[in-house]
Amino acid sequence: MAGKVVLVTGASRGIGAAVARRLASEGDTLALVGLEPDELKKVAEDCGPDAGWWEADVTDLESLRAAVEGVRERYGRIDVVVANAGIAAPGFTRSMDPAVWERVLDVDLYGVWRTVHLTLPHLIESKGYLLLVSSLAAVVHIPGLASYNTAKAGVEAMGNSLRAELRHLGVRVGVAHMTFVDTDMVRGVDDHPVFGKVRTGIPFASRVYPLELAVEKFTAGIRKRSRVVHVPGWIGPMKIFRALIPHLVELGSRRSVAKADRAALADIEARGADVSSRASGAGGLADTAKAKGARG
């Protein structure tokens, strides 16, 4: 599949940027979509003279529509779409800023839906490949990330539905599940004074995997038009035991959550709910600024 036009959302940094660079090095033409123009420009420069970038917010349908139309106008086609844009905001549901809780769904779930909605006509035309970026969070619902868990479970369900809906049209659909990977977003979660400790104390979530592993798995999945991408591979077998996993999470976290709940309330008292539960990492800060600007 090398030599394709690949549109990647959330391409300013993290997995999106790293996968874009790898695909470009193997001969693909990259169309990069994201919020941070300076970062997008840097990634595009790394991806070669044919790469292009478009500043767009996946929560803004018209902004995203303009980007998709710009990609099609420049390259004449779209062969692969990686719906990768996402944020994570740590916090317990009862105490975190409701606007932030909803923003995670708007970016991570509805942003994927908007990307699918606008790019599907082009993928049907090219009989292309659509990769929706979900997460291990769709399977293992750790406390303190309820909004993220909800969004990523929805992305998985969307991918499973689309796979059946689009097969007869020649479009293949993949869903990517990865655990914690060494990105700016994950480092931001770990830097949180309360929720960094919650993550490291829960089985299945304590280890952070290298970014290069995700790049290898994503690239291989795109080349093979795979129905699933697992980073690392043990996530696949784990899905068989979905019914048991919530019980294990509850058992493993029943002592730590009570302590963390008190600490979260104290952190909110000290820093405010908007700061304590805002999206993590530099990309999360960019999204927070965009959301505040949209609200005026």
Image (cartoon, helix red, strand yellow):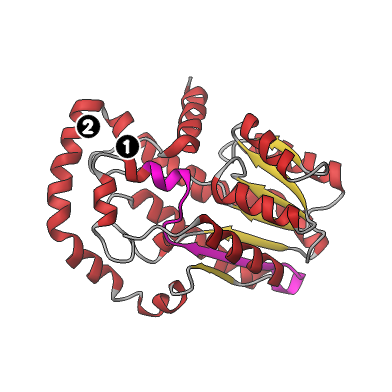
Q: Are marks 1 and 2 in contact (CB under 8 Å)?
A: yes
Horizontal arrangement in the rendering, residue 104 relative to residue 168 (left or right): left
Q: Residue furthest top?
A: 296
The percent position of residue 36, horizontal first and vertical second, equals: 60, 32
Task: Identify the magenta region.
Answer: 166-188
The percent position of residue 48, horizontal first and vertical second, equals: 78, 44
Q: Nearer the viewer, residue 108 or 286?
A: 286
Q: Which residue is mark 2?
A: 268
Residue found 27% across the figure and 68% down from its top: 246
Q: Is residue 217 something that shows in the picture? A: yes
Check disc 1 and give the amino acid type.
Ser
Q: Earlier in the sequence, mark 1 or mark 2?
A: 2
Q: Is residue 167 magenta?
A: yes
Q: Is residue 62 something that shows in the picture? A: no
Q: Which mark is residue 277?
A: 1
Check disc 2 and give the amino acid type.
Ile
